[in-house]
Image (spheres, grey):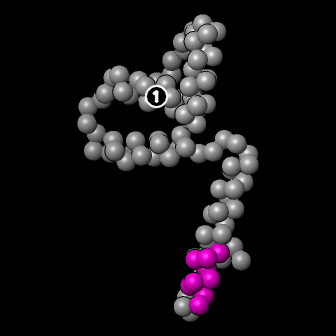
């Protein structure tokens, strides 16, 4: 569901500041707050979905942090490939040398 809410300038500023302090998007902050105030019935996938939403909210929005995360992923993939090569197995990430 999509909602449109008219906020005062001070409310909007407060919302932006709180989201920035917590390092999450405004959408994630609002969704989390509504979820805390209006819990839904138990869904068998709720915990998994909540975890995924947390991961999404933690995705870095800063270009420098994104670049570092990408570099960490590539280093991880290279290490896995190297370990597998040494064991005589095929690399899991053939595009990463």
- Residue depicted at 30% across the width and 29% down the height: 40
For residue 65, above or below residue 22: below
Residue 54 location in percent, x, y? 47, 42
- Determine the main secondary structure of the stretch shown in magenta: helix
Q: The C terminus lies in which quarter of the figure?
A: bottom right
The boundaries of the magenta stretch are 78-86
Residue 82 location in percent, x, y? 62, 83
Residue 7 location in percent, x, y? 57, 9
Side of 73 where 3 appears, left or right: left
For residue 64, above or below residue 97: above
- Residue depicted at 63% across the width and 16% down the height: 13
- Residue depicted at 58% across the width and 36% down the height: 23
Q: Quadrant of residue 77?
A: bottom right
- In the displayed image of the protein, which residue is found farthest to the front? 21
For residue 81, above or below residue 65: below
- Residue depicted at 57% across the width and 9% down the height: 6
- Identify the secondary structure beneath mark 1: helix
Q: Which residue is mark 1?
A: 31
Residue 1 location in percent, x, y? 46, 24
Is residue 90 visible to us here? no
Q: Residues within 10 Å of mark 1 (few under 14, many from 20)?
A: few
Q: Quadrant of residue 58?
A: top right
The residue lying toward the viewer, choosing from 18 and 67, is: 18
Residue 9 belongs to magenta span: no
């Amino acid at each position: 569901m999509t909602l449109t809410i008219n906020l005062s300038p001070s409310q909007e500023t407060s919302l932006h500041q709180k989201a920035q302090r917590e390092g999450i998007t405004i959408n994630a902050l609002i969704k989390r707050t509504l979820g805390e105030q209006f819990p839904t019935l138990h869904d068998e996938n709720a915990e998994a979905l909540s975890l995924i939403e947390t991961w999404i909210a933690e995705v870095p929005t800063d270009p420098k942090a994104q670049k570092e995360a990408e570099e960490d992923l590539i280093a991880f993939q290279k290490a896995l490939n190297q370990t597998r090569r040494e064991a005589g197995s095929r690399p899991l990430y053939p595009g990463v040398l």
